[in-house]
Image (cartoon, rainbow, N blue to C red):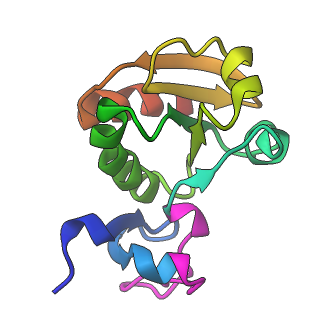
Amino acid sequence: MTSTAEITLVRCPSCGATNRVPVANLRAGKRPVCGRCKTPLPLEAAPVTVTDANFAREVEASPVPVLLDMWAPWCGPCRMIAPIIEQLAGELAGRVKVGKLNVDENPSTSARFNARSIPTLLVLKGGREVDRIVGLQPKAEIARRVERAVA
């Protein structure tokens, strides 16, 4: 049996059904399809890794808003919020791209957005910040703020 940490929920952009997709399948490059209507599910069901080098391509050029998790591996609250970010990536797939940026490995982008505390979650449209959530927050609050930016 697969634990819930290894499953991501992906909402179908066609019929709205919520699908349980194993994260290992996504990492293996398998293309999931909706269980109800058989439409291919968006590949952005898992957070993408954002770096200083690919920020323009992944965030600024994104056709949908981006939720960017600025984190570090040594940060306890960052590790606590990581499963929430994974869940939101699946739930918001197709409407919002979710990315993770390691602040230790990407100092230019961290400095550009003045990320002084982590975890810092940025909601960006066209590479511009429209909302900022600092610190550990409940999933419902993060989702509410992201939905407000999407609307």
Quadrant where the image shows the N terminus: bottom left
Place residue 4 in its image quadrant.
Answer: bottom left
User: Number of labelled discs?
Assistant: 0
**Magenta span includes 41:** yes
**Magenta span includes 63:** no
Q: Where is residue 5 in the image (x, y as percent from the top left)?
A: 26, 64
**Which residue lies at the image location 58% right of the left edge and 16% below the top edge?**
115
Above/below status of 69 relative to 98 = above
Identify which residue, 57 or 126, lies in the foreground: 57
Q: Determine the residue located farthest toward the left in the rendered image.
A: 1
Q: Where is residue 24 in the image (x, y as percent from the top left)?
A: 43, 79
**Which residue lies at the image location 35% right of the left edge and 30% below the top edge?**
142
**Which residue lies at the image location 60% right of the left edge and 39% below the top edge?**
101
Above/below status of 8 relative to 109 = below
Q: Determine the residue located farthest toward the front in the rendered image.
A: 74
**Secondary structure mostly seen in the magenta stretch:** loop
Above/below status of 107 relative to 64 = above
Place residue 19 in its image quadrant.
Answer: bottom left
Q: Where is residue 124 in the image (x, y as percent from the top left)?
A: 64, 28
Q: Can residue 151 be seen in this view?
A: no
**Which residue lies at the image location 31% right of the left edge and 51% below the top edge?**
83
The magenta stretch is 27-45
Identify which residue, 34 or 86, lies in the foreground: 86
Q: Can residue 119 be seen in this view?
A: yes
Identify which residue, 151 or 80, lies in the foreground: 80
Q: Relative to 60, is 67 on the left or the right?
A: left
Q: Where is residue 58 in the image (x, y as percent from the top left)?
A: 75, 47
